[in-house]
Amino acid sequence: MKRLIVIVALTLAPFAATAQSTGVLATRRPITWGMIFALLFLMLGPIKLLGPFAAATKDCDRVFRLRLATRAFLFSVAAVTIAAALGEQVLDNFAIPVLVLQIAAGLILFLVALQAVMHQYDVTRPPERTEPPTLAHAFSPLAFPTIVTPYGIAAVIILISLAPTTEIRFMVVGVVYFILFLDWLAMLVAHIVVRWFNPLLLLLGVILGVSQVALGLHLMLVGMEDLIAQGVFTAPGK
């Protein structure tokens, strides 16, 4: 396991070296690999996954946790692969501009993140699940929507659609696969992390929630701004 992590880290080292200096997507605002990784990590990363997975599998043995995490990982990889392969084609078939998808993703992210943030102030908490999980939970709710979120899929489709070359598209998908691999690792050590760093996770959860609210607003505002710049809301002849 340690060797695999080292190999992956060395593979991504060249990207980290140029993350802040190389614009890779054809947009009005240059998008770097660092920005791509940060965006996808925020939407698909393991921070939001540790607590729910540890709580759901607290009474399960290690073998079951491994099987559940691996199955959820495979479902997530399959979902991302399908989204990457068909997403742009679906946009073309329905004549949906990428900016509209960006606004929709921002709206979903904003509403989901706002609900999570406001839930912290809810004094009435729903009863915790008492029945043990089964392998069927790997698909839902673990892979969907906890790991592969709707706005995360939208982000993947947007990045794939904006990629100017096939090589960059494959590299974007590779970054997504790496983040899903981090999710799998996080599930394997979720109980240890929650046991020792639960206060820190709570703080990170708050920061992540507020950041997602802001990111959702940002995606919507930038999308609207770009649509206005393209003259979408301007009457013909004006």
Image (cartoon, helix red, strand yellow):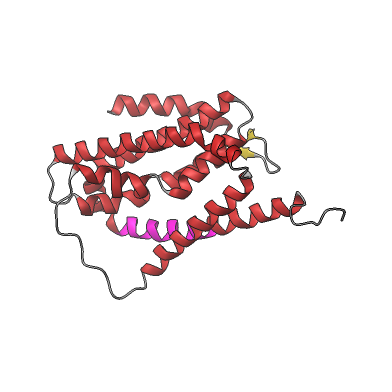
Q: Residue furthest right?
A: 237
In which quadrant of the rendered view does residue 168 lie? top right
Quadrant of the drawing holding the C terminus = bottom right
Horizontally, residue 231 falls left or right of residue 8, namely right
How far across and down, in percent of the image, does residue 157 sit?
A: 53, 39
Quadrant of the drawing holding the N terminus = top left
**Which one is in front, 218 or 162?**
162
How far across and down, in percent of the image, does residue 55 sit?
A: 22, 54
Location of residue 46 with respect to 121 vertically, above or below: above
Magenta stretch in the rendered image: 199-214
Horizontally, residue 67 falls left or right of residue 170, namely left
**Which one is in front, 142 or 19?**
142
Location of residue 226 with respect to 165 vertically, above or below: below
Q: Residue furthest bottom?
A: 123
Q: Main secondary structure of the magenta part?
A: helix
Q: Is residue 211 magenta?
A: yes
Taking the spot 12% from the left edge, 51% from the top edge, the residue there is 59
**Which one is in front, 161 or 23?**
161
On the question of residue 33 being in view, the answer is no
Q: Is residue 28 magenta?
A: no
How far across and down, in percent of the image, does residue 163 sit?
A: 60, 32
Taking the spot 39% from the left edge, 37% from the top edge, the residue there is 79
Location of residue 20 with respect to 209 vertically, above or below: above
